Amino acid sequence: MSFVAYEELIKEGDTAILSLGHGAMVAVRVQRGAQTQTRHGVLRHSVDLIGRPFGSKVTCGRGGWVYVLHPTPELWTLNLPHRTQILYSTDIALLTMMLELRPGAVVCESGTGSGSVSHAIIRTIAPTGHLHTVEFHQQRAEKAREEFQEHGVGRWVTVHNQDVCRSGFGVSHMADAVFLDIPSPWEAVGHAWDALKVEGASGFLGGVCPGGRALPTLLGSGSYDPEVRTVQATLQLGPNPHPC
Ligand SMILES: C[S@@+](CC[C@H](N)C(=O)[O-])C[C@H]1O[C@@H](n2cnc3c(N)ncnc32)[C@H](O)[C@@H]1O
């Protein structure tokens, strides 16, 4: 299983998303001999998960059932263990579009946080791109590395455990795009500039934190020629046009 490529059958070590009913989901790591308690009863990984196709409807101990879904970055965003505030798919869609991310892109990001944005970026830039993600909190950096390996995407990402405002992104003149979701993005503008390829590059400051204070840094030095756009993304849910 990989978050980047679909595989049909569930294996030991995979991450699977259990859909328990309307709006209720949980992520599980599939392990031979393990059990997961759900509100519909117990799910035995060896019997109920391993070897079955993703998408299966599986009956649990008390007779209720769950759907076992293949993981995607969007489902992971809804089910990941929160170590920080995270960005959700509406904002991630916006930044993916504004940064013009595509397969083959080299991207720098900070902070890694809970890896919500990172998983989506990796899925978009694979199989030939690379993500450099910078996180100064040691445990968060280590946990993110571990999750990227578990999710089969480790080869497309390097986690740098350092302060992006002091030490930058660990790469120079390589990135097609930079994304900052830290409390003080203006302190990293110089490093973002250094990380970007000189021509044709784009940067996006902000996320859950205001990027506006970065503007004096961008304009003040005279080195940058920023195009500044303020965008608010809202998600509107309407009736399902194709009810089953
Ligand atoms: C809001 S979280 C990022 C969430 C992430 N975008 C996601 O969706 O999962 C901000 C993260 O930035 C990290 N951080 C803050 N300042 C930093 C800095 N100067 N250098 C590196 N990481 C930093 C924090 O430790 C935290 O994990």
Image (tube, rainbow, N blue to C red):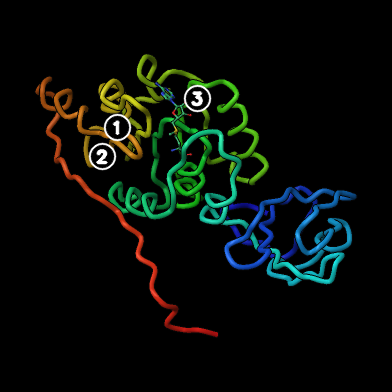
Q: Residue at x 63, y 58 (%)?
A: 25
Q: Secondary structure at mark 2?
A: loop
Q: CA distance from mark 1 to mark 2?
A: 6 Å
Taking the image as four quarters, which one is ligand 1 found in? Answer: top left
Left or right side of 236 for 158: right
Q: Residue at x 69, y 56 (%)?
A: 16
Say whether mark 3 is within 8 Å of ligand 1: no
Q: Quadrant of the C terminus?
A: bottom right
Which label number is shown at residue 196?
A: 1
Q: Residue at x 51, y 55 (%)?
A: 74
Q: Quadrant of the N terminus?
A: bottom right
Instruction: Using the image, determine if residue 41 lies above or below residue 111.
Output: below
- The answer to whether the residue labelled 1 contacts the one labelled 2, judged by CB atoms less than 8 Å apart, is yes
Q: Which residue is denoted by mark 2 in the rendering?
A: 201
- The answer to whether the residue labelled 3 contacts the one labelled 2, judged by CB atoms less than 8 Å apart, is no
The disc labelled 1 sits on which kind of residue? Leu
Badge 2: few (under 14), some or many (20 or more) residues near its Cα, within 10 Å? some
Q: Secondary structure at mark 3?
A: strand
Q: Whole-percent x and y of residue 204? A: 28, 39
Q: Whole-percent x and y of residue 217? A: 17, 23
Left or right side of 70 for 206: left
Q: Which residue is denoted by mark 3 in the rendering?
A: 160
N-terminal-most mark, 3 or 2: 3
Instruction: Using the image, determine if residue 63 lies above or below residue 49.
Output: below
Which label number is shown at residue 232?
A: none
